[in-house]
Structure formats: C-alpha cells, structure tokens
Image (cartoon, rainbow, N blue to C red):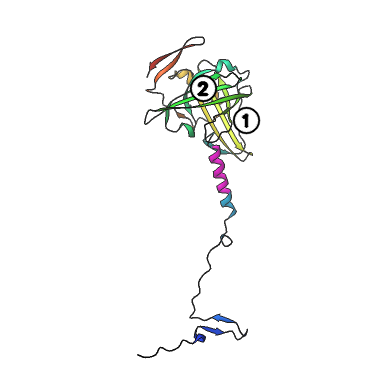
Amino acid sequence: LQQQPKVNKQSIYQSDERKPGRRVCSKRSEIRPEPYTMATIRIPRWAGIGVGLLTVLLLLGVEAQVPGFGKCPKVPVVENFDTYAYLGRWYEQEKYPFFFELGGKCITADYSLNPDGTIGVLNTQKNSITGNENSIVGSARIVQSARLAVRFPSAPFNVEAPYWVVGTDYKTFAVVYACSDLRGFINAKVAWILTRKRHPDIETMKKAYAVLDSAKISRAYLTRTDQKNCGEELVKVSKGVYKTVVKG
C-alpha cells in the first residue's frame, strides 16, 4: 500500500501578508452562514399595528360584530324610559350578526326586576342543528334613562356591554342598539329588533324599521332570526298574568 501524502496546512489556510500571524480562509475552505437571531429578524411596524387591530376587533367582537372606524355614532334613546313596562319576554326577530348567537334559533330575552334594583336578564336559544336549548343569565343596570349596561358573569369576557333602547312602545316592539369603541379609532356595533309576539304582524315590523331609519342605524346588516318550530310560547292573559301555549 502506498503511504498517503501528508496534508499541508498551508493548502487550507494562507497567511495574510498584510497582517502577519493572522490566517484567513482560502477558496477551498467552507463558509457557513451565521444562524438567525432575534437581532437579525426585523418586523415592520405596520405588522405590529395589524396584530393590534385584529386583537381589538376580536375583543370588541364579544359585544358586537359590525366593525367601523372612528367613534361610536350618537344615537338617540327613549325619553322617560319606563323600566317596569319593559320587563317581560321579548322575541328576537332581526339582529346584526352576533357572536354568541351563531347557529341559534327561537331566541328570547326575559327581563325581570332583581331585589337589588337591577334588571335580571335571561337569554335563551335553541341550537338550529341539535335542537338543544341553552341559556345565559346576566344583569343590567340603568346608566341613564334608556341607556343600560349589561353583564354576563359566565361569558368569556366578564365586562359590561352597552344596551340602549332606541325605540319601543312596550307592547309590541323594541329596537335595541349597542356600540363600543377604542379611543375613537375603531368601533363595533350591533342592533336588535325585539317583539312581544313570536310571529309579529307587518305593521309591528314597520314601526321598528321606522325607528332604525330615524336613528340612522343601517338595516343593511340585519339578519332574520328563525322563530319557526319553537314549541312553547308565553302569552299574556292579563296584567302580570301569563300562560304557556304550544305554537309553531
């Protein structure tokens, strides 16, 4: 066997003639790139702003689902609001897309008076696929006249949400509106049309639409709530007296 020739280190490293004693890699040496670190990765400023906007919209989405820019618009509410006349059961007819009501039908809202003076809130709906009924319990306090603040302790974000009664005759319909904003930069809105009957007549709905138009609340985002095949319905017999009947 032939003896392998010895490798001359100078074939791999060459002395730098300009700086004696320093060695530099020759053309035959392998140059490996340095690994990326947080110092070498630059994130543009607009990316951070985008993430912030998305986070805010998700948080606001807990209360409302129609985003917009700027401060919440000024919306008039009912003057001399009669809290006691407003109590009882309401059936949801139309609404802006709302996170907590996705996939729900036969949606109702029951309002009662709590011993501490606040208003008890019971929202109920059925799953449109399984038919299972679920509900959420909360309370509302009067902030000013028909401007209320609602809180649901079991909700993911236990924060107060605005609840403004824009128009109602207490006997047939009510229009409710809510809006939240972040320092006047972006806002999110939601609106509901509630009625005392599960299947209201056209005239009742026309009165609700007139209130929306007068308050300059867009009807473009309204979606109809399915109130068919819901079973029992609470019917008022006389003042303070209700009975349950089976209806479609």
Give the magenta range. Answer: 49-60
Q: Position of residue 43 (x, y in %)?
A: 57, 56
Q: Secondary structure at mark 2?
A: helix
The residue under the point 54% across, 26% down is 138
Question: Residue 214, which numbered label?
Answer: none
At numbered mark 1, what does the secondary structure look like: helix, strand or loop? loop
The residue wearing badge 2 is 208
Residue 74 numbered mark, or none: 1
Q: Residue furthest bottom?
A: 2
Distance CA(mark 2)–CA(mark 1): 19 Å
Q: Quadrant of the N terminus?
A: bottom left
Q: Nearer the viewer, residue 85 or 186?
A: 85
Q: Position of residue 104 (x, y in %)?
A: 43, 30
Look at label 2 and name its amino acid. Ala
x, y percent for residue 26: 52, 81
In-front residue for pair 213/100 = 100
In this rendering, position of residue 19 left or right of residue 171: right
Check the image and name the residue furthest to the left.
1
Q: Mark 1 is on which residue type?
A: Lys
Residue 97 visible somewhere in the drawing = no
